[in-house]
Image (spheres, rainbow, N blue to C red):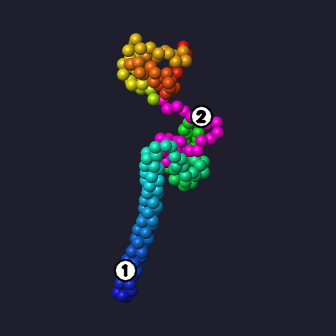
Amino acid sequence: MRTQGFSDEVEIKHMKLTSGSFALIVVAALSLQVFAHGNHDKKAHGKAQSQASKTAKVEFLGKGDGIETCPVTGDPVNKELKNEVNGRVFYVCCEGCADVVKKNPELFLKPVEGEKKEQAFLGKGDGVETCPVTGEPVDKNLKGEVDGQTFYVCCAGCIDTVKKNPAAYLKKAKAK
């Protein structure tokens, strides 16, 4: 009888070891999956960002259409990650890819016919108290006008800058 009890104890220990080993294998497999996706994000985003910063001229880097496949990695998109840039809706596989596309949409999204290209706003001041080009206090003697909108600047050079590209430096005046 003593040998039977001893055999039961060994069998119980063996079962505990087996179930413990199985649990460890499951945890390791899940960790590898998370690690693999983490590397996907870092590799794809890092490569895309470094290529984007190295390109002097705009070279298209998109790997997907932004509807079914991620424009940064080419992986299937997550339809819950809906984004918009310049009036265009696109989808990505993860939040990191959304940030990459939003920083340089022309590198990752092919232009669509009729899509409006939005002028980046560069203004640093309001054109009344602060110069729209530099953000410095204005000289009230240096006054300019574009499309019926009056503005002030800090120096004569800034008047020319604003007149060459008013959309980049002046916000449209609100009607009273």
The amino acid beneath tag 1 is: Glu
Q: Residue at x 44, y 55 (%)?
A: 43
From what the image shows, is residue 147 above or below residue 86? Answer: above
- Does 88 lie within the magenta span? no
* Helix, strand or loop for disc 2: loop
Counting from the top left corner in percent of width and height, residue 30 is at 45, 62
Q: Residue at x 44, y 14 (%)?
A: 143
The amino acid beneath tag 2 is: Lys
From what the image shows, is residue 168 above or below residue 147? Answer: below
Q: Which residues are magenta?
A: 95-121
Question: Which residue is under mark 2?
Answer: 116
Counting from the top left corner in percent of width and height, residue 148 is at 54, 15
Label 2: few (<14), some or many (≥20) within 10 Å?
Answer: few
Q: CA distance from mark 1 to mark 2?
A: 76 Å
Label 1: few (<14), some or many (≥20) within 10 Å?
Answer: few
Q: Is residue 109 visible?
A: yes
Counting from the top left corner in percent of width and height, residue 42 is at 43, 53
Q: Is residue 100 left or right of residue 3?
A: right
Q: Residue at x 46, y 46 (%)?
A: 55
Question: Which residue is under mark 1?
Answer: 9
